[in-house]
Image (spheres, helix red, strand yellow):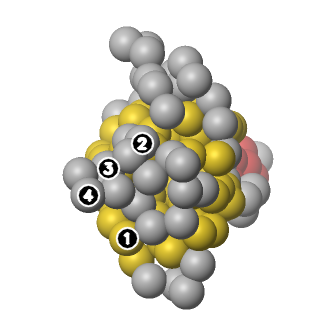
Amino acid sequence: MMLHQSRKVSLSLCLASILLMAACQEKPADSTPGTTGTAGTAAVRVSDVTLGRAIGTDKSISDRTETFRPSDTIYASVATDGSAQSATLRAVWTFEDGQVVDQATHTIVPTSRERTEFHISKPDGWPAGKYKLEVFLNDRSVETKNFEVRAQ
């Protein structure tokens, strides 16, 4: 009888150890587009990208537009939701022929809804034409915004 109970205890301990090890293993990354993180933890995602001519102190666009003048500074406000120990946002600005106009990277440590600001300016003026902003979260493209510069 004692041997039978000993086996039950050993089996129970073994099963508990297996469950504990499985729970401690790193989970696969969240595969939802625009998100990053591990399953079982809050993930960060890009929830909105807005373009405009002016940005407020809270890093939200105060003069929204997708049509700019050659002399404008072009702002992008990237809203993220969620949390992560670290995340990287990258903005790549291109001209209609695919030529990269500018790119910038910000490392963020989001804890809730936050905004990150990107901008480009050209003192001698932007050439008229169609442009694109592509936003990456941890090297994954998550949002694209098309805009235009029109001669005055």
- Work out how far the residue at label 4 is from the one at label 2, CA to CA, in angstroms: 10 Å
Mark 2–mark 3 contact, CB under 8 Å?
yes
Residue denoted by label 3: 121
The type of residue carrying mark 4 is Asp
The type of residue carrying mark 3 is Ser
Nearest to N terminus: mark 2 or mark 3: 2
Q: How many neighbours does mark 4 have within 10 angstroms: few (below 14), some (14-19), or many (20 or more)?
A: few
Q: Is mark 3 on a helix, strand or loop?
A: loop
Nearest to N terminus: mark 4 or mark 1: 1
| x, y percent for residue 98 | 52, 84
Residue plotted at (24% across, 52% down): 123
Residue denoted by label 1: 101
Camera-side mark, 4 or 2: 4
> Which of the labelled discs sits on residue 72, or is there none?
2
Specify the quadrant of the image occupied by residue 66.
top right
Camera-side mark, 3 or 4: 4
Nearest to N terminus: mark 4 or mark 2: 2
Residue plotted at (44% across, 24% down): 55
User: Closest to the observer: 100 or 69?
Assistant: 69
Mark 4–mark 1 contact, CB under 8 Å?
no
| x, y percent for residue 109 | 35, 34
Above/below status of 30 relative to 100: above
